[in-house]
Image (cartoon, helix red, strand yellow):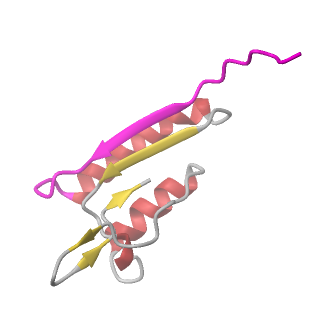
Protein backbone atom coordinates (compact mmCIF):
# COMPACT_ATOMS: atom_id res chain seq x y z
CA UNK A 1 0.00 0.00 0.00
CA UNK A 2 1.31 3.42 -0.93
CA UNK A 3 1.23 6.31 1.48
CA UNK A 4 -0.03 9.63 0.25
CA UNK A 5 2.61 12.05 1.46
CA UNK A 6 2.16 15.76 0.97
CA UNK A 7 5.59 17.35 0.91
CA UNK A 8 6.05 21.09 0.88
CA UNK A 9 8.74 22.54 -1.34
CA UNK A 10 9.66 26.22 -1.27
CA UNK A 11 10.63 27.86 -4.56
CA UNK A 12 11.83 31.45 -4.63
CA UNK A 13 13.11 33.88 -7.21
CA UNK A 14 15.43 36.81 -6.95
CA UNK A 15 16.51 39.62 -9.26
CA UNK A 16 19.02 42.44 -9.01
CA UNK A 17 18.70 45.15 -11.60
CA UNK A 18 22.07 46.15 -13.08
CA UNK A 19 21.34 49.68 -11.81
CA UNK A 20 20.95 48.51 -8.17
CA UNK A 21 24.05 48.37 -6.01
CA UNK A 22 25.25 44.86 -5.14
CA UNK A 23 25.63 45.90 -1.47
CA UNK A 24 21.93 46.85 -1.17
CA UNK A 25 20.89 43.69 -2.99
CA UNK A 26 23.05 41.55 -0.70
CA UNK A 27 21.44 43.00 2.43
CA UNK A 28 17.97 42.17 1.09
CA UNK A 29 19.16 38.70 0.06
CA UNK A 30 20.53 38.07 3.57
CA UNK A 31 17.22 39.12 5.14
CA UNK A 32 15.25 36.76 2.88
CA UNK A 33 17.59 33.86 3.64
CA UNK A 34 17.24 34.49 7.38
CA UNK A 35 13.45 34.23 6.97
CA UNK A 36 13.92 30.88 5.23
CA UNK A 37 16.03 29.50 8.10
CA UNK A 38 12.88 28.35 9.90
CA UNK A 39 12.11 26.11 6.90
CA UNK A 40 15.49 24.39 6.72
CA UNK A 41 13.91 20.92 6.91
CA UNK A 42 12.01 21.54 3.67
CA UNK A 43 13.43 21.41 0.15
CA UNK A 44 14.15 24.99 -0.95
CA UNK A 45 15.12 26.16 -4.43
CA UNK A 46 16.11 29.74 -5.19
CA UNK A 47 16.64 30.80 -8.78
CA UNK A 48 17.36 34.20 -10.14
CA UNK A 49 19.26 36.74 -12.10
CA UNK A 50 21.56 38.67 -9.80
CA UNK A 51 23.75 40.25 -12.47
CA UNK A 52 26.71 39.25 -10.30
CA UNK A 53 29.17 37.09 -12.24
CA UNK A 54 30.12 34.04 -10.20
CA UNK A 55 32.83 33.15 -12.70
CA UNK A 56 34.72 36.08 -11.15
CA UNK A 57 34.56 34.57 -7.66
CA UNK A 58 38.34 34.71 -7.18
CA UNK A 59 38.62 38.43 -7.96
CA UNK A 60 35.20 39.98 -7.30
CA UNK A 61 34.07 40.64 -3.73
CA UNK A 62 30.38 40.82 -4.75
CA UNK A 63 30.58 37.30 -6.21
CA UNK A 64 32.35 36.11 -3.06
CA UNK A 65 29.79 37.78 -0.78
CA UNK A 66 26.71 36.34 -2.48
CA UNK A 67 28.26 32.86 -2.62
CA UNK A 68 29.40 32.98 1.00
CA UNK A 69 26.02 34.27 2.17
CA UNK A 70 24.10 31.55 0.33
CA UNK A 71 26.52 28.86 1.54
CA UNK A 72 26.23 30.02 5.16
CA UNK A 73 22.47 29.34 4.91
CA UNK A 74 22.96 25.86 3.44
CA UNK A 75 22.64 26.68 -0.26
CA UNK A 76 25.03 25.70 -3.03
CA UNK A 77 25.19 27.00 -6.58
CA UNK A 78 23.94 24.39 -9.05
CA UNK A 79 25.15 26.08 -12.23
CA UNK A 80 28.88 26.28 -12.89
CA UNK A 81 29.03 27.27 -16.55
CA UNK A 82 28.26 30.61 -18.22
CA UNK A 83 24.58 31.51 -18.50
CA UNK A 84 25.00 34.65 -20.58
CA UNK A 85 27.23 34.28 -23.63
CA UNK A 86 27.94 36.93 -26.24
CA UNK A 87 30.56 37.28 -28.95
CA UNK A 88 32.79 39.13 -26.49
CA UNK A 89 32.03 37.67 -23.06
CA UNK A 90 30.69 34.77 -21.01
CA UNK A 91 29.26 35.28 -17.54
CA UNK A 92 27.45 33.29 -14.87
CA UNK A 93 24.86 35.83 -13.73
CA UNK A 94 21.83 33.54 -13.50
CA UNK A 95 21.81 31.35 -10.43
CA UNK A 96 20.05 28.26 -9.05
Q: Position of residue 77 (x, y in %)?
A: 50, 60
Instruction: Please give left or right for residue 5 compared with residue 21 in the image.
Output: right
Asked if residue 42 lies in the magenta stretch, the reply is no
Q: Is residue 37 left or right of residue 46?
A: right
Residue 8 located within the stretch drawn in magenta: yes
| Residue 70 place in picture, x, y as percent | 49, 54
Between residue 1 and residue 31, name the one nearer to us.
1
Q: Residue furthest right?
A: 1
Decide: is 13 above or below 24: above
- Left or right of 86: which side holds 63? right
Q: Can you say which quadrant of the picture contains the N terminus?
A: top right
Q: Residue most toward the front?
A: 1
For the point 60% across and 24% down, the residue is 8
Q: Residue furthest left?
A: 19
Indicate the position of residue 28 as horizontal and vertical percent values: 32, 43
Q: What kind of secondary structure does the magenta stretch mostly adopt?
A: loop
The answer to whether 17 is drawn above or below residue 66 in the figure is above
Span highlighted in magenta in the image? 1-21
Figure label count: 0
Position of residue 87 measured from the top left corner of the image (x, y, whole percent):
16, 82
Task: Judge from the rendering whether residue 35 lies leftward or rightward of residue 43; answer left or right.
Answer: left
Residue positioned 35% across, 78% down in the render = 56
Q: Residue at x 30, y 63 (%)?
A: 93
Q: Quadrant of residue 58?
A: bottom left
Residue at image position (40%, 60%) is 66
With respect to residue 11, does 58 lie above or below?
Answer: below
Amino acid sequence: MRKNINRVCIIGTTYRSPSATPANYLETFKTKLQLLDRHKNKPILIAGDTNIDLLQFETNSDAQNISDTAFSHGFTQMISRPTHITEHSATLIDHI
